[in-house]
Image: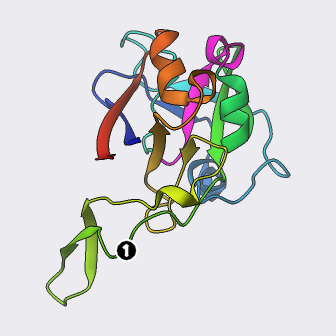
Amino acid sequence: MKIYKIDIDQNETRLVLPDIEGLEILKYKIFDGKKKADFWKDSIWYIFNPTLTATNFLSFGTTSALVFDQKVYDSELYDILERAGEILPITIKKENYYVLNITEIINVLDEEKTTWELLEDNTKGDITEYSFLKNRFTNSSLFKIPETYTTEIFVHSDTKVFEEEFYTLYKKLNFTGLIFNKVYSE
């Protein structure tokens, strides 16, 4: 089993932002595992840096949610994305895009084997070396952990059939925009 942390190259990937003013913007920018479909409206968004090359996955300014295009939505990845959370519509220049709000937050971090940065007051800071409990994974290959659910998205591979793994299908379908940093291997 391998686990990757999903990142986005902020310098090479287009950044999308909601065209909303005031504090209401926070409802569309904070992804903490709670469902948003009840209040989410297909709002107008814009690309902040349109001169960058188009990719299938776009930057959201954070890695707490994934933004993707219609090609990804129509692909074999759809079922995997839907299993991980809510797929919420957005519109950019009359084109359909989507935000994946990952609600699959699972307690899989092996606390005893994980290494943490220690802060001056002896409290835990960032995780420097991840370790996971293999028997706690669910059917979703995309997930978050309680310790970092507002800032990190993970994906596991080499645990299921090829067609059910986000990482493998992403590579097979030649999608662009995401970076996979391996954080664990067993």
Q: Position of residue 105 (x, y in %)?
A: 60, 59
The quarter in which the N terminus is drawn is top left
Displayed quadrant of residue 185? top left
Secondary structure, mark 1, is loop
Asked whether, in this view, residue 109 is left or right of residue 86, the answer is: left
Displayed quadrant of residue 66? top right
Q: Position of residue 104 (x, y in %)?
A: 64, 53
**Label 1: which residue?**
111
Task: Name which residue lies at 82% across and 51% down.
Answer: 39
- The answer to whether residue 167 is magenta is no
Which range is magenta?
Answer: 64-76
Asked whether, in this view, residue 184 is left or right of residue 99, the answer is: left
- The answer to whether residue 75 is magenta is yes
Task: Name which residue lies at 37% across and 74% down.
Answer: 111
Displayed quadrant of residue 68? top right
Q: Is residue 31 above or below residue 93?
A: below
Asked whether, in this view, residue 138 is left or right of residue 43, the answer is: left
Q: Is residue 2 above or below residue 148?
A: above
